[in-house]
Amino acid sequence: MEDHSKAVEGISTSVRGFYERKEKFRINHGSTNSTRHAAKGNNMVDTSSLSRIININQHTKTAQVEPNVPMDRLVEETLKYGLIPPVVMEFPGITTGGGYAGTSGESSSFKHGFFNRNLNSVEMVLANGKIVLCSKTEKPDLFHGAAGACGTLGVTTLVELQLRDAKKYVEATYHPVSSVAEAIRKIGELTADLDLDYVDGILYSKTQGAIVTGRLTDDPGRGVPVQRFSDAKDPWFYLHVKDKLAKRPRSTTEAIPLADYLFRYDRGGFWVGASAFEYFKMPFNNFTRWWLDDFLHTRMMYSALHASGQAKKYVVQDLALPYTTAEDFINYADKVFGIYPLWLCPLKQSPQPTMHPHLKHQQEPMLNIGLWGYGPSRPDDFLQANKDLERRLRELGGMKWLYAQTYYTEEAFWEMYDREWYDSLRAKYDATSLPSVYEKVKFDPDAEQSYTEPSLAESLKASWPISGLYGLKKAIDSGAYIQARSSAWKSMETINRMDMKK
């Protein structure tokens, strides 16, 4: 803890200097799972060293974790104690700090809410340099308000998160559906089952999909086969589910080792990795996916996406809607974008006011729709399609997640959030020297200009296959593939809490 305290004091000193000079600054975390364009500027506070797990308490079922600890390292450590966070982000590289400052809802969030709802406390350096601890009982307004606020109320330096008992497997059942309406209805029915721990869905088209349920267990049912998804020779999860339903068009159950289930979408990045094969005009089959496996984990794909500039051409949006209008939105997305598969994830809302996506009626569950794929090829058409998407989303009572590019005007943006509440928190905790949420997520006019008037050099760099090869090189340079290769969770099959208590 001494090293942690020294690091936080250094961050506090740096922040205080910006505050006294009345200069705004941004935070360098060392990694990102955002698809927004990276902001430029010299005023940076470096928190990348805060990447340690300080303590895991088996008796209180809690963990003290620095903000840059990624999910895979966290899970590897908590599994040693027979414990697991209630909400684990599906991408191994997403960090605990990112889960708090951003919006992280996963297949267990219909039960446990967003990631931040499972934290006990957060240590934070305020924008004036003061180090504070906030929780449900100490500075509760800051504890709640900073969740989802994109780091605009302070710098997170430590979180204490709740843990729950882990099991060896997730007994996963794939329920086939043949329409959008059936998929939404099925999710509503299944999330009412208190014995289930996980629920999400995949729509392969408007007439084919699967709702996937999961139940933690040490003892899968008799005859239930074990299936892995972490090795290069294993199938990608979404392809495996589709293949299972094609062979047997009724509910099918398998036992997935717990960590394999939690990170089941890492290889292929759900299904976004298939676009790389399309881009490079390569065959998409078991052999090529095995051969190129190092490049097809989410850390590598995020690095390549940012470096290649393909993020400017790719629609990457998570959209939360009421169940009652979700089908209308999917019909709209089908007509305008034609992107499949779509991810469906039921969510429990956070108390309002909040910077998380939320609905008009607070007790109403939300359905997240993941829309990820190539948009219109012409830059101006791409821009307009994204603006139209935001407009249609608002008409249907939905909200988007702020990790992605946001095209709203400032007036339209604040019509969706409680600006008076947010601004009062910023004033109370001296956070006005930090960029606001809107300043962080808004579409940069300079970037918009580059969309419509690229220079010759930019055009060349963005051309096929140069942009893709450049992105691939930068991803290799990042060394992110080494993290995937060295993941210990892939071999953590057995959890024996009784042995650890002896």
Image (spheres, rainbow, N blue to C red):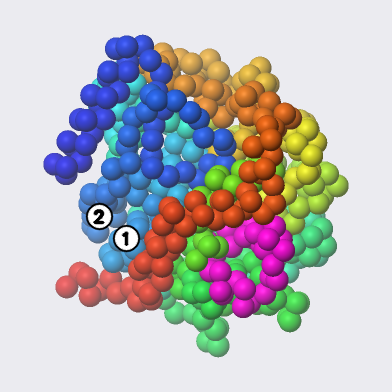
Residue sticking out furthest to the left = 2
In the picture, residue 252 is in which quadrant? bottom right
Residue reaching furthest to the right: 335
Q: Which residue is mark 2?
A: 56
Left-right relation of 464 to 84? right
Q: Secondary structure at mark 1?
A: helix
Image coords of residue 463 (percent x, y): 69, 47
Q: What is the C-alpha distance between the residues marked 2 and 1?
A: 7 Å
Are circles 2 and 1 on residues that touch, CB within 8 Å?
yes
**What's the residue at 22%, 30% (across, down)?**
10
In the rendering, which numbered label is found on residue 78? 1
Report if residue 491 is visible in the image.
yes
- 10 up-or-down from 345: above or below: above
Does 445 sit left or right of 170 as displayed? right
Please state which amino acid type lies under the numbered disc 1.
Thr
Q: Reply yes or no: does residue 283 show up in magenta.
A: yes
Estimate the x, y position of residue 174 in percent, counting from the top left: 65, 70
Q: Work out which quarter of the rendered image holds the C terminus and state it.
A: bottom left
Q: Amino acid at mark 2?
A: Ile
Write the residue at 69% across / 32% down: 454
Sequence-first tag of 2 and 1: 2
Q: Which residues are magenta?
A: 266-293
Q: Quadrant of residue 272?
A: bottom right
